Amino acid sequence: MDIQTANTNLDADRDNVLETVLGAYRMRVEITADVRYCGTWYDQEPSTRYGQFHLLTEGECWVSGAALEAPMHLRCGDLIVFPGGVRHLLSSSPDAHLPETEVPGDTAMLCGELEFITGTSNPIFSALPAYFVVRSNESSQGFRQLAAMLTETSRDRRWGRQLVQNKLADSLFTMAVCEYVRRAEHPRGLLAALTDVRLSRALAAVHERPGEDWTIQLMAQHANMSRTAFAELFTATVGMPPIQYLAHWRATEARRLLKNRRFSVAAVAEMLGYRSEAAFRRFFKRIEGVGPGEVRKPKGGLDD
């Protein structure tokens, strides 16, 4: 296999895993502010329990805070994401406390919040750093086009603008994660595994067929590795053993499937490789802390 083919296969496997993980968790992405600054300015953003992001739609600005080693310069089209919602400062200069040597131009940005609102843990959020930046001039054409659509929509004052903005922002965050994985120098956790062609192959297979009778040996075969070497590399990279990761992924898929009332609990159990509904219920309660019926229960409703 030549290098180009190997890279193409790695991209396909990585994108498959990212798509399944991001699709399995219900995510809230919301534009909360469309702001414009002029002259000398600074804006302190407090820490929150939500992730935060800022998309520069005009001009430039500086971002600083405890999570950053030095002030970060952003230009129009750049996106900065704080997955953990850490405190940070936006300003017109590297040091908001020093006077400007010249009057800066206007700056505009879209600010928003994001959070995953289903599941007990999210392997992508856990693997993201305190912040990451997607530079417009280094990003894919698709990312730039989507950012431009979001910017244009923010200027449209017709009914439905907020709903369209939020849907575009949801897609932009997904693309931002993909951009980060492709360019990160020191990824960690699941995202680090996706940069390894061997682990990526095994993960793609597990995510595509979670109900298969997986063993460490079978996963290792997909990675073209020995059982021992695969288990050691997977655990060191992802932060948990392969079988434990499989259990958490099955629980995540179970949550998604249980939300679909067309599938009975027994049907979901069968799809995920459990021989009996009782065994599935015990597994799900052990991982998620609640029974399948609690997941299916509408808010304020009764268990089925």
Image (cartoon, grey):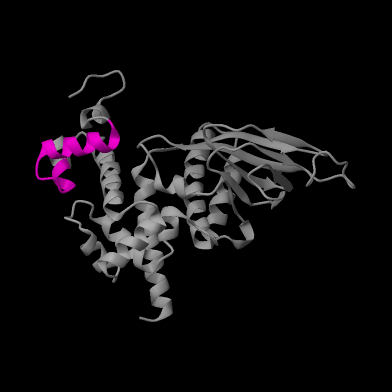
Side of 135 relative to 179 (left or right): right
Side of 257 relative to 10 (left or right): left
Residue under the image location 87 percent in, 44 percent down: 100
Choose between 265 and 68: the one closer to the eye: 68
In the rendered image, residue 222, in percent from the top left (x then y), is placed at 26, 67
Where is residue 294, by image quadrant? Answer: top left
Question: Which quadrant: the N terminus?
Answer: bottom left
Choose between 120 and 240: the one closer to the eye: 240
Side of 34 relative to 84 (left or right): right
Q: How many marks?
A: 0
Where is residue 26, by image quadrant? Answer: top left
Choose between 9 and 142: the one closer to the eye: 9
Q: Is residue 155 visible?
A: no
Residue under the image location 24 percent in, 68 percent down: 221
In the rendered image, residue 132, in percent from the top left (x then y), is placed at 58, 51
Q: Which residues are magenta?
A: 269-289
Q: Is residue 279 visible?
A: yes
In the rendered image, residue 200, in percent from the top left (x then y), is placed at 36, 63
In the rendered image, residue 17, in percent from the top left (x then y), is placed at 36, 56
Question: Which quadrant: the C terminus?
Answer: top left
Q: In the image, is residue 276 part of the stretch drawn in magenta?
A: yes
Choose between 256 and 287: the one closer to the eye: 287
Q: In the image, is residue 198 part of the stretch drawn in magenta?
A: no
Q: Main secondary structure of the magenta part?
A: helix
